[in-house]
Image: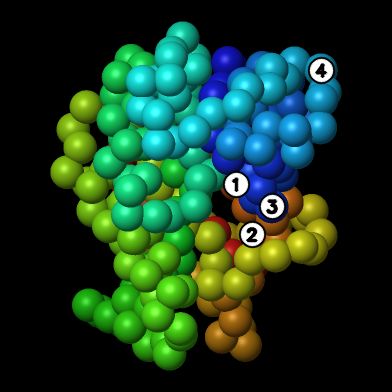
């Protein structure tokens, strides 16, 4: 496929970029700091700014799918969705947040946490992004929430998928590596199972 990847220079974005190219996809890698993206075959590097909806939409146009691995900020949510819609690309996969996953009926993970206000603002905006997508009928969106803990680790290809509920192991931990998260995301791109839905993955 021809894929536009927003936020290709970040911790998760760079792993998604690697997984896409490993599987032979052609990628337009977009980042504000595009110089941080390592050149490789089948990758076109572009500088893009979420604040410039028109320019971003132009970069996205003509792709089979858009993947967004951008940070969550109040000014970004509507602009990202608008840029994807304006581009004419229907398939849109978002690297989501874990805070809005349910840990009990009607109770989200972020409601059980005591975190600094700045961090809680990010979790809340991720939830706002999910709500905005759920109200958006024009896109074939997927919101992919990671496990509660995501970071460097092995590329095992072995994990469990879930829906709106937090996935935990026998010890009650919810973890996944950047690499395995990227595998699960590209699996969803290639064989969609969660159109207009949220899903998650953990060990």
Is disc 3 surrounded by few (<14), some (14 to 19) or many (20+) residues within 10 Å?
A: some
The residue positioned 71% from the left and 44% from the top of the image is 15
Where 43 falls versus 170 (above or below)? above
Query: How far apart in space, not on screen, are marks 1 and 4 (Cα)?
Result: 22 Å
Residue to which mark 3 is pinned: 11
Tag shown at residue 58: none
- Nearest the eye: 52 or 151: 52
Q: Earlier in the sequence, mark 1 or mark 4?
A: 4
Q: Earlier in the sequence, mark 4 or mark 2?
A: 4
Residue to which mark 4 is pinned: 41
Query: How far apart in space, not on screen, are marks 4 and 3 (Cα)?
Result: 20 Å
Which image quarter holds the N terminus? top right
Could you tell me residue 155's position as x and y percent? Answer: 79, 53
Query: How far apart in space, not on screen, are marks 4 and 2 (Cα)?
Result: 29 Å
Tag shown at residue 159: 2
The residue positioned 69% from the left and 52% from the top of the image is 11
- Nearest the eye: 25 or 162: 25
Tag shown at residue 184: 1
Could you tell me residue 54's position as x and y percent? Answer: 36, 20
151 left or right of 132?
right
């Amino acid at each position: 496929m021809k894929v536009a990847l927003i936020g290709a220079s970040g911790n998760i974005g760079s792993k998604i970029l690697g997984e896409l190219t490993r599987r032979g996809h052609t990628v337009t890698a977009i980042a504000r700091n595009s110089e941080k993206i390592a050149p490789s075959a089948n990758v076109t590097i572009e500088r893009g700014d979420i604040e410039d909806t028109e320019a971003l939409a132009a970069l996205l146009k003509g792709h089979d799918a858009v993947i967004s691995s951008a940070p969550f900020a109040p000014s970004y949510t509507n602009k990202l969705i608008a840029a994807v819609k304006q581009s004419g690309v229907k398939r849109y996969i978002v690297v989501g947040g874990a805070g809005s996953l349910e840990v009990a009926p009607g109770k989200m993970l972020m409601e059980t946490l005591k975190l600094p206000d700045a961090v809680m603002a990010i979790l809340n905006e991720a939830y706002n992004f999910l709500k905005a997508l759920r109200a958006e009928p024009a896109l074939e969106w997927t919101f992919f929430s990671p496990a509660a803990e995501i970071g460097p680790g092995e590329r095992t290809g072995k994990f469990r998928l879930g829906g709106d509920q937090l996935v935990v192991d026998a010890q009650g931990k919810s973890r996944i590596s950047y690499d395995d998260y990227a595998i699960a995301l590209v699996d969803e791109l290639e064989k969609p199972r969660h159109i207009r839905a949220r899903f998650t993955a953990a060990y």
